């Protein structure tokens, strides 16, 4: 039954502009990744802040992938300008995660260089994972548009609804040695996010230890 559902999901998303959505928990290794996420050379991970984009990107990419944040990307671009070529490490890395590129719309030269890097990697059959930054300023869109739709997939993450939020909080309660009944209190956290719920429960645990 699970395999049948997975095959139907793959068929729905294996088109020219593949789009997937779900919570981070659905893509953190608890179930097989959709085929389109495993095969397409460019994966774009989007979603609100603290939704788990970076964690999901690492799972999709694999433990041995190279991860470059916005600062590292800037340093690599400076090296590219000076040397007139990208570093071999970025060009030849089997899977590269570009985590949180921002403000590329105001740096068109840098945007063009990074887009060219992604195109080179796609042409070489190498995978690149783009992770939307803390500010949705269109940087990721600029980069993903460099690759034809049939060679990329966009994964938009969302926070779970009440039942999923409660299960997450219960797992944190187990980690902290709290009664699972406390988990329901996190449903009142606004705006709700994984980190906010965890911080709330850690505060409850700290209060209990201090008494």
Image (cartoon, helix red, strand yellow):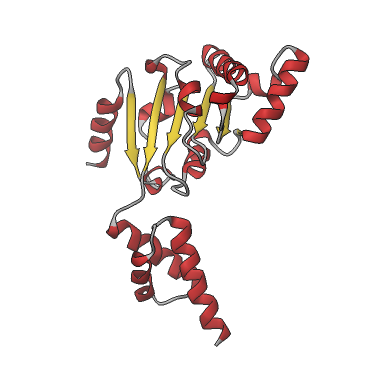
Q: Is residue 118 left or right of residue 84?
A: left
Identified at 39% across, 34% down, the residue is: 155
- From this viewpoint, which residue is outermost toward the bottom? 211
Q: Is residue 143 left or right of residue 26?
A: right
In this rendering, the answer to whether 189 lies above or below 203 is above
- The quarter of the picture where the N terminus appears is top left
Q: How many marks?
A: 0
Quarter of the image holding residue 209? bottom right
Image spot of residue 101 (x, y percent): 56, 32
Image spot of residue 144 (x, y percent): 46, 22
Quarter of the image holding residue 84? top right
In front: 167, or 5?
167
- From this viewpoint, which residue is outermost toward the front? 106
In front: 141, or 169?
141
Quarter of the image holding residue 89? top right
Residue 133 in sight in this render: yes
In this rendering, the answer to whether 117 lies above or below 24 is above
Identified at 51% across, 30% down, the residue is: 130
Identified at 48% across, 75% down, the residue is: 204
Residue 32 in sight in this render: no
Image spot of residue 104 (x, y percent): 56, 26
Q: Is residue 62 left or right of residue 89?
A: left
Identified at 37% across, 73% down, the residue is: 180
- The quarter of the picture where the C terminus appears is bottom right
Image spot of residue 202 (x, y percent): 51, 70
In front: 82, or 17?
82
């Amino acid at each position: 039954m699970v395999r049948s559902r997975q095959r139907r999901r793959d068929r729905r998303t294996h088109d020219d502009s593949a789009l997937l959505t779900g919570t981070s928990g659905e893509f953190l290794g608890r179930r097989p990744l959709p085929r389109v996420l495993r095969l397409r050379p460019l994966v774009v991970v989007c979603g609100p802040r603290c939704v788990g984009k970076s964690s999901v990107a690492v799972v999709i990419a694999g433990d041995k992938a190279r991860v470059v944040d916005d600062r590292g990307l800037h340093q690599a671009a400076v090296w590219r300008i000076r040397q007139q070529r990208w570093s071999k490490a970025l060009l030849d890395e089997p899977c590269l995660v570009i985590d949180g590129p921002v403000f590329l719309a105001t740096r068109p030269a840098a945007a063009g260089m990074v887009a060219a890097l992604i195109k080179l990697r796609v042409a070489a059959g190498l995978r690149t994972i783009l992770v939307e930054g803390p500010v949705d300023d269109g940087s990721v869109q600029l980069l993903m548009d460099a690759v034809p739709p049939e060679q990329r997939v966009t994964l938009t993450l969302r926070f779970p609804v009440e039942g999923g939020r409660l299960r997450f909080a219960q797992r944190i309660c187990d980690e902290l040695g709290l009664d699972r009944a406390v988990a329901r209190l996190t449903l009142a956290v606004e705006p709700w996010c994984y980190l906010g719920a965890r911080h709330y429960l850690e505060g409850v645990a700290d209060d209990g230890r201090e008494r």
